[in-house]
Amino acid sequence: MRLPAIVAAALLMPALCAAQDGAEHVPLQADASASGWAFAATGYYYALDDQGDYFSVVATADRDALHLEARYNYEALDSGSLFVGWTFAGGEALSWEITPIIGAVMGSKHGIAPGFEASAAYGRVDFYIEAEYVSDLDVRDDSFTYAWSELGVAPLAWLRFGLVGQRSRVHESDRDIQRGGFAQLTSGRFTLGAYVFNPDDSDDRFAIISLGASF
């Protein structure tokens, strides 16, 4: 499927759902259940012209300040990772959260990955960033810093869009930092998003489609 068709489908499908009830990378936050745990999971489909398409998955579990996270095809293809962290939050008009994390990467890459996830919101505007340093235990020179950031605005309860940037080793590119735009549409506990990176470069343009759920 070509890039325009993928993006169009991603934006149309959730709009139909949102019209019914007015309703990674700001991660989904579920309300805590009776057990005190909140869970969320998001799948990402990478549509690439210059290399094979692939899926990535991120799942989280939170209880009070404790944060647990599992990822697949995130730091590297055919690799999984497990993280534990502790969340600090505050603010009123300007609310913020920061979660220092540390994890282990297993599979095609073996390493230790300290990092953090942070967000801030003021009115309808928000900023989110996650970053980590992957220390490769097999080949020291293959260690790298990964980052994903979003600057978003939510004019409606079911709509959020803005700018996105990432630094990644999974997507092969001459650019050190990928940048572009995104849009998310939410219906109930589900969020569908479309990200387009390097829209001004036909040789390095690619898209990500995400589907997330909180429970």
Image: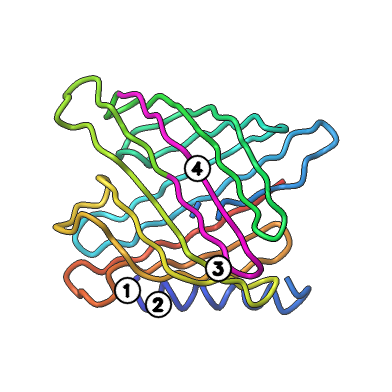
Q: To which residue does mark 4 refer?
A: 117
The magenta span reads 111-130
Left or right of 98: which side holds 31? right
Q: Which of marks 3 and 4 is in front?
A: 4
Q: Which residue type does callout 4 highlight? A: Glu
Q: Residue 198 carries which label?
A: none
For image coordinates 45% across by 62% down, the residue present is 209
Measuring from the top left, give residue 168's x and y in whole percent. Answer: 29, 48
Q: Which residue type does callout 1 highlight? A: Arg
Q: Are marks 1 and 2 in contact (CB under 8 Å)?
A: yes
Q: Is mark 4 on a helix, strand or loop?
A: strand
Query: Mark 2 vs mark 3: which is more N-terminal?
Result: 2
Q: Are marks 2 and 3 in contact (CB under 8 Å)?
A: no
Magenta region includes residue 188: no
Magenta region includes residue 121: yes
Q: To which residue does mark 3 refer?
A: 184
Q: Which of marks 2 and 3 is in front?
A: 3
